[in-house]
Image (spheres, helix red, strand yellow):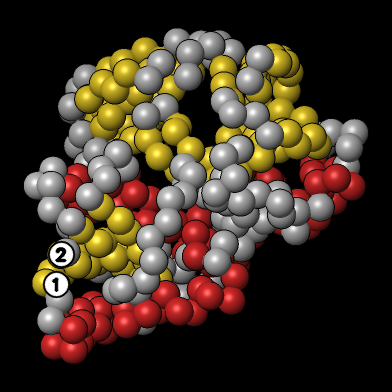
């Protein structure tokens, strides 16, 4: 078996590369393991590396060395390959994936605890052709999560602090509700919603826990839907929401366990790639956009935008 350390050199607030190199070399010398360390060079690179290595058919154990973004990319690279497994060495700011392991989280900081550990299957969320391991969110929460990375670069903010700061910015200067048609298995509801959190695991956003009972091996998606509320009500809701206490607000928060979740937007969006390469998925079909190219994302059709390379885009919403 090959042991592949995929290292994000920009993860975390300090450079952890030498520490990981030393751990890998220790495994090589103490246990005679076939070890390789690879640095990522761009967004999405970990997925490309993992997938290419999996295609060789060799038995592989990947060590995702970074934050939750690196973990997600490696998972997307190995999904569907029986010859590959992954573990995590946390060097990011949030590390929400590992919080699901409770007190055992600290064991993941040393590769000596990981190289011969048992392998077990885990659920994942298929989000328009991409994989999410813990939580997939839409609404104000998604906007907050999108901006967390920008604020996490500040030396004054930890993972949860970055989330709270992003939440404050989006809460104060942007609207809360979005009009969607939501289908949970075969039950469809149209309305204005603050957020939808589809939970395979328990943690995201630097430690927020919307559904405490979510587990990554139970085969269901604990899906929390929250109707649009005013700012004062939402402010009262955030604290309990972060602790999994949604049941205190039955008038506008509801959790169920569907197998399939569909969220359809009322507004068609037009995405134009200004620089780099982007991938837009509409109805599960991926479309690659290069500089100057555009695509229409029609209303009521599930869609997602992903930076295949670092790219700039122009988003036009047609009312």
Labelled disc at residue 52: none
Q: Nearer the viewer, residue 203 or 145?
A: 203
Looking at the picture, how far across and down is residue 49, in whole percent? Answer: 17, 51
| Residue lying at 70% horizontally and 16% vertically, measured from the top left | 187
- Judge left or right: residue 232 versus residue 158: right
Circle 2 packing at 10 Å, graded few (<14), some (14-19), many (20+), is some
Q: Is residue 73 visible?
A: no
Looking at the picture, how far across and down is residue 55, in whole percent? Answer: 13, 43
Q: Nearer the viewer, residue 85 or 36?
A: 85
Looking at the picture, how far across and down is residue 88, in whole percent? Answer: 37, 66
Q: Nearer the viewer, residue 260 or 264?
A: 260
Circle 1 packing at 10 Å, graded few (<14), some (14-19), many (20+), is some
Q: Which residue is mark 1?
A: 35
Label 1 sits on a secondary structure element that is strand
| Residue lying at 40% horizontally and 40% vertically, measured from the top left | 131
Rendered position, 102 above or below 48: below
Label 2 sits on a secondary structure element that is strand
Rendered position, 12 above or below 215: below
| Residue lying at 57% horizontally and 62% vertically, measured from the top left | 100
Q: Quadrant of residue 34?
A: bottom left
| Residue lying at 52% horizontally and 61% vertically, measured from the top left | 96
> In the rendered structure, are the residues bearing label 1 and label 2 in contact, judged by CB atoms less than 8 Å apart?
yes
Q: Is residue 223 visible?
A: yes
Looking at the picture, how far across and down is residue 205, in whole percent? Answer: 57, 56
Position of the N terminus by quadrant: bottom left
Distance CA(mark 1)–CA(mark 2): 6 Å
> Which of the marked residues, 1 or 2, is nearer the chain's N terminus?
2
Q: Which residue is mark 2?
A: 2
Position of the C terminus by quadrant: top right
- Judge left or right: residue 18 versus residue 254: left
């Amino acid at each position: 078996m090959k042991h592949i350390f995929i290292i994000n050199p920009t993860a975390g607030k300090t450079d952890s590369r030498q520490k990981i190199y030393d751990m890998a070399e220790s495994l090589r010398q103490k246990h005679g393991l076939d070890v390789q360390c690879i640095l990522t060079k761009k967004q999405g690179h970990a997925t490309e590396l993992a997938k290419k290595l999996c295609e060789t058919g060799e038995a592989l154990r990947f060590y995702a060395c970074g934050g939750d973004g690196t973990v997600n990319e490696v998972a997307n690279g190995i999904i569907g390959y029986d010859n590959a497994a992954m573990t995590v060495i946390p060097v990011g700011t949030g590390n929400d994936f590992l919080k699901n392991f409770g007190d055992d989280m600290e064991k993941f900081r040393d590769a000596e605890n990981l190289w011969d550990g048992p392998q077990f299957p885990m659920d994942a969320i298929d989000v328009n052709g991409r994989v999410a391991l813990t939580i997939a969110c839409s609404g104000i929460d998604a906007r907050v999560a999108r901006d967390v990375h920008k604020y996490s670069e500040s030396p004054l903010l930890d993972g949860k602090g970055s989330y709270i700061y992003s939440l404050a910015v989006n809460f104060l200067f942007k609207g809360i509700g979005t009009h969607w048609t939501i289908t949970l298995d075969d039950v469809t509801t149209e309305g204005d919603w603050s957020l939808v959190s589809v939970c395979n695991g328990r943690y995201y956003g630097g430690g927020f826990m919307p559904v405490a009972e979510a587990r990554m091996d139970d085969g269901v998606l604990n899906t929390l839907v929250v109707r649009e509320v005013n700012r004062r009500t939402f402010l009262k809701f955030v604290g309990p929401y972060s602790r999994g206490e949604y049941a205190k607000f039955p008038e506008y928060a509801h959790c169920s366990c569907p197998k399939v979740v569909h969220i359809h937007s009322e507004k068609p969006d037009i995405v134009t790639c200004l620089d780099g390469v982007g991938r837009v998925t509409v109805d599960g079909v991926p479309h690659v956009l290069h500089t100057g190219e555009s695509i229409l994302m029609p209303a009521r059709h599930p869609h997602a935008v992903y930076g295949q390379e670092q790219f700039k885009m122009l988003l036009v919403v047609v009312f």
